[in-house]
C-alpha cells in the first residue's frame, strides 16, 4: 500500500485533521477524512483506506490496548462510572422492594 503524501508538497509528514463543520461531518458517510501536512500546512481530504491505519508504520501513534494501556484519568473515570451504576442499581432495587414504607 502506498504511503499517504501531501498533494501540495509531496511530504509524508502528515496527520489526521479534525472535522470542522456539519459539511465535513457529512463527508464521513462518503468515507472521506481530513488530513493536514505538517510541513506546508495544506489541508486536504482522502478516502479512508481499508487498512486499519493508513499511516506508515513509523508515523503511527503508539497503539495501547487493555486496562494497563489506559491513562490514569481514564481509569478513574471508568471506575467512577461503575461505582455510580452500582449505586443507582442498588437504589432502584431498594425502591422496587418497598423503599421506606413498603414491606
Image: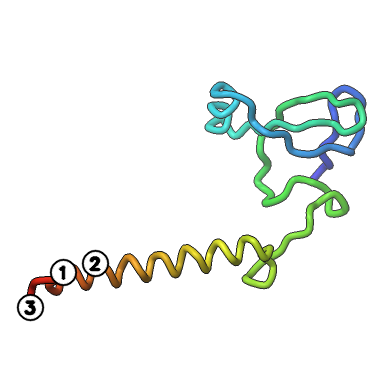
x then y, percent, for residue 56: 83, 49
- How would you rate the neighbour count of disc 1 (Cα within 10 Å): few for under 14, some for 14-19, many for 20 or more? few
**Image disc number at residue 65:** none
* Residues at circles 1 and 3 in contact by the CB criterion of under 8 Å: no
**Separation of disc 1 and disc 2 at Cα?**
6 Å
Above or below for 37 versus 69: above
- How would you rate the neighbour count of disc 3 (Cα within 10 Å): few for under 14, some for 14-19, many for 20 or more? few
Front one among 72 and 57: 72
Q: Residue at x 75, y 32 (%)?
A: 35
**Separation of disc 1 and disc 3 at Cα?**
10 Å
x then y, percent, for residue 38: 87, 33
Badge 1 marks a residue whose secondary structure is helix
Q: Is residue 43 left or right of residue 27?
A: right
Residue matched to label 3: 103
> On the image, which quarter does residue 37 sit in?
top right
Give the mark nearest the N terminus, 1 or 3: 1
Residue matched to label 2: 92
Q: Is residue 4 left or right of residue 95?
A: right
* Residues at circles 1 and 2 in contact by the CB criterion of under 8 Å: yes
* Residues at circles 2 and 3 in contact by the CB criterion of under 8 Å: no
Q: Residue at x 89, y 38 (%)?
A: 12
Badge 2 marks a residue whose secondary structure is helix
Number of on-image labels: 3
> On the image, which quarter does residue 88 sit in?
bottom left
Q: Residue at x 64, y 30 (%)?
A: 19
x then y, percent, for residue 60: 80, 52
Residue matched to label 1: 96
Where is the C terminus found, in terms of image quarters?
bottom left
- Camera-near label (1 vs 3) is 3
Q: Residue at x 18, y 68 (%)?
A: 95
Front one among 9 and 68: 68
Amino acid at each position: 500500500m502506498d504511503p499517504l503524501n501531501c498533494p501540495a508538497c509531496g511530504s509524508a509528514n502528515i496527520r489526521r485533521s479534525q472535522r470542522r463543520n456539519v459539511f465535513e461531518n457529512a463527508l464521513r458517510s462518503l468515507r472521506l477524512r481530513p488530513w493536514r501536512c505538517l510541513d506546508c500546512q495544506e489541508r486536504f481530504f482522502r478516502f479512508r483506506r481499508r487498512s486499519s491505519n493508513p499511516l506508515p508504520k513509523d508515523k503511527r501513534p503508539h497503539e495501547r490496548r487493555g486496562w494497563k494501556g489506559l491513562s490514569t484519568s481514564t481509569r478513574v473515570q471508568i471506575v467512577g462510572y461503575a461505582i455510580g451504576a452500582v449505586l443507582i442499581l442498588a437504589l432502584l432495587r431498594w425502591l422496587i422492594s418497598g423503599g421506606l414504607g413498603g414491606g
